[in-house]
Image: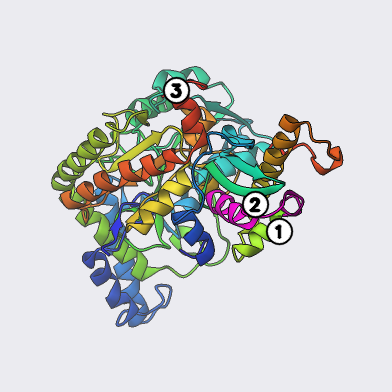
Amino acid sequence: MKTIYVDNAATTAMSDTAINAMTPYLKEVYGNPSSLHTVGQTAKEAIEDARARFARLINADPKEIYFTSCGSEADNQALRSAAYNGLKKGKKHIVSTAFEHHAVLHTLKKLEKEGFEVTYLPVSESGLVTAEQVERAIRHDTALVSVMYANNEIGTIQPIREIGAVCRKAGVVFHTDAVQAVGHIPVDVKADNIDMLAVSAHKFHGPKGVGALYCRKGVPLNTFIDGGAQERNRRAGTENIAGIAAMTAALEEACANMPRTSAKLKSLRDRLIDGLLKIPHSRLNGDRDKRLPANVNMCFEGIEGEGLLLLLDARGICASSGSACTSGSLDPSHVLLAIGLPHEVAHGSLRISFSDYNTDEDVDAILQAVPEVVAYLRNMSPVWEALEKGEKEHLI
Amino acid sequence: MALYSEKVMDHFTNPRNVGKIDDADGVGEVGNARCGDIMKIYLKIDNGVITDVKFNTFGCGSAIASSSMATELIKGKPLDEALKLTNKAVAEALDGLPAHKMHCSVLAEEAIRAAIKDYYDKNGIAYDKAQFPEPHED
């Protein structure tokens, strides 16, 4: 059975380009970049070369790029740094949104316990926040605004440039978790008025275990891991050279191919959305247009998402869901609740996220499988029976 | 998939006794859609013996597998024996459930009790109320 991997928002397969960029640093160039000898300095040059190339891809200065072990680490470091530096000036307020990734939400929860006050902006039904909302929420004691570039579950792209402008005008540090955006849509930290931005390599066919933090010149950045002087004293630990080289190569490739892949992915996405919407009592979650090219997120009433995933997996289709059973708690995804979906509807969600490795045939196979699996689960669902008999009202 | 045992996957992908019994003698429904699990069990009872059983379930893989296994375990059994079925026995018969899925087997036990209680109530059969605690608001 052919595997149809459509969970690329969770992680991607590494590209050959990324793997090939990695191997020299696993084999020949094994030196520690902090060593003074030739072997070490060759490694050092490789990192600085990668930093310059990486910076160019998001229109940053090389000195504004700090390599990290993952996107979550970059988010943690950025948020804590901006919060603590704000606190030094008596600023204890943070503005964010209700549907951030847990790398941001859980860090903010901890900061709340430490005495910070966080305003979580509500998200519209279509999964968007506005610059006006941010502007209204900013106070004289706001230290930081954090709004994700694109949502990991429903794929909605936020008006980052406008939000950044509002923050810049108010003199508030603006952080964005851009893990789902970089490598997928054009990101320009200068034009977008971004102060801090988190990136993760494995979302764009790079390796796991490496990410980056952009921190604009002039915005103070605290040390996150104490130890050696790596990353200009901001993050100790011998650098993951192979990972950094592979991430940079993967991002170069993703950016160079973006015009082609973006058009292709949008066509796969739109055909899948149109096809799945033919299933009665289904809905698309998140704005249809302000949406990542590769993201599809649907709800099907009367069924639960885990069963859907397992039955699709049995047919070789690897997808994701925001149901409680897949989140490991009794509540469905906080993102789906944030856009106002009732619990019982949110339980029946399905996320399909494509990559360039997917094909039209994959869409055909998904469009064949999903309606059958949904019908099968509905047929044994007492909730669906009650809906069909009119004992319960359809919510979608 | 390593999340579930082969038995769970078997009962999830080929569930036994799915469906409804239109002239059921007892029907039990437990759980709620908000939390993501609803189980409905239909019993056909003849002379104190469960002659047929069907289920409908809204829920995850382990909820459907638990329903399927529980119906298999009580089919053809006298009511007093069916009442002795525990959630642990359902989980064991499935070669175990992940810890955070044990509540699915609890729902199966409760759905069967609710269906038997419904049969007793409908037929004016006296029973020990202690045998039928209120189902969990899972």
Q: How far apart, in angstroms, are the residues tagged by discs 2 and 1? A: 7 Å
The residue indicated by pointer 3 is: A394
Disc 1 + disc 3, Cβ < 8 Å? no
Residue at horizontal 43%, vertical 43%?
A377
Give the percent coordinates (x, y) of residue A310: 43, 53
Magenta-span inclusion, residue B66:
yes
Q: How far apart, in angstroms, are the residues tagged by discs 2 and 3? A: 28 Å
The residue indicated by pointer 2 is: B105
Range shown magenta: B62-85
Q: Name the residue type under label 3.
A: His
Tag on residue A161? none
Give the percent coordinates (x, y) of residue A7: 35, 52
Magenta-span inclusion, residue B64:
yes
- Name the chain under label 1: B
Q: How far apart, in angstroms, are the residues tagged by discs 1 and 3? A: 36 Å
Relative to B19, is B45 on the left or the right?
right
Give the percent coordinates (x, y) of residue A195: 41, 38
Disc 1 crowd rating (10 Å Cα; few below 14, some 14-19, many 20+) is some
- Name the chain under label 3: A
The residue indicated by pointer 1 is: B88
